[in-house]
Image: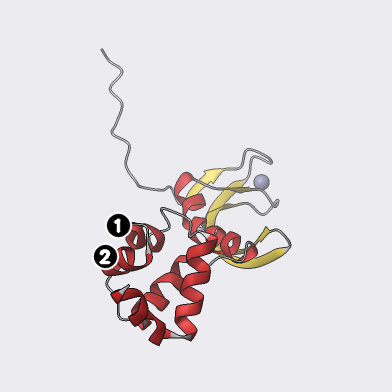
């Protein structure tokens, strides 16, 4: 077997030929507007860019803006973002584990919300919003 493929590494070439005009594309980070349901936000988008206007994104480039996209979608749907969940949970002085036990979802639920592995539900978003404004109500849940 002479087909010895070199191991795939994470090295990203700084330049690559443009598939559109044959010119040279360069690595850059450029502002890009993403839009969900009429809401939009500008994010720094890494990728290869050509003077002709062509842009190419690797999987990692796409993943780099995933979080911003998920946050925007949550906001568009009236749900809390992962950052909101973490901020409110800390304000309530709850560990991730305790928050899941007390508010629902189980001991790993908040870890997943905050890692953006699971979208926050509408009921959980609403509950956290209420507790953010009325943290004293947490006591009533604990003893229940
Ligand atoms: Zn080009």
- Count of all numbered marks drawn on residues in the image: 2
Q: Tell whether circle 1 marks a residue whose Cβ is less than 8 angstroms from ligand 1.
A: no
Q: Residue at x 27, y 15 (%)?
A: 2
Image disc number at residue 9: none
Query: As displayed, is residue 55 above or below residue 7?
Result: below
Identify the mark at residue 108; answer none if there is no mark.
Answer: 1
Quadrant placement of the N terminus = top left
Q: Quadrant of the C terminus?
A: bottom left
Q: Which residue of the protein is positioned furthest toward the right in this rendering? A: 38
Residue 97 numbered tag: 2
Q: Residue furthest front?
A: 144
- In the rendered image of this protein, does residue 95 appear above or below residue 29? below
Q: How many angstroms separate mark 2 from mark 1 (CA)?
A: 6 Å
Looking at the picture, tell me which residue is in the foreground, 71 or 59: 71
| Nearest the eye: 78 or 133 | 133
Percent position (x, y) of residue 113? Answer: 40, 60
* Residue 29 x, y percent position in the rendering: 53, 62
Other-residue count near label 2 (Cα within 10 Å), few / some / many at <14 / 14–19 / ≥20 = some
Which residue is outermost to the top?
Answer: 1
């Amino acid at each position: 077997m002479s087909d010895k493929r070199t191991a795939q590494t994470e090295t990203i070439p700084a330049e690559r030929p443009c598939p559109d005009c044959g010119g040279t594309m360069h690595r850059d980070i450029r502002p890009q507007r993403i839009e969900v349901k009429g809401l939009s936000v500008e994010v720094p988008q890494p990728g290869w860019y050509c003077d002709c206007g062509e842009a190419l994104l690797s999987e990692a480039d796409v993943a780099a803006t995933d979080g911003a996209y998920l946050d925007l979608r949550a906001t568009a749907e009236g749900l809390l973002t992962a950052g909101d969940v973490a901020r409110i949970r800390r304000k309530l002085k709850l560990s991730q584990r305790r928050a899941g036990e007390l508010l629902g979802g189980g001991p790993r639920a908040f870890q997943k919300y905050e890692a953006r592995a699971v979208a926050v539900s509408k009921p959980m978003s609403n509950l956290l919003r209420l507790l953010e404004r009325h943290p004293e109500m947490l006591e009533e849940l604990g003893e229940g």
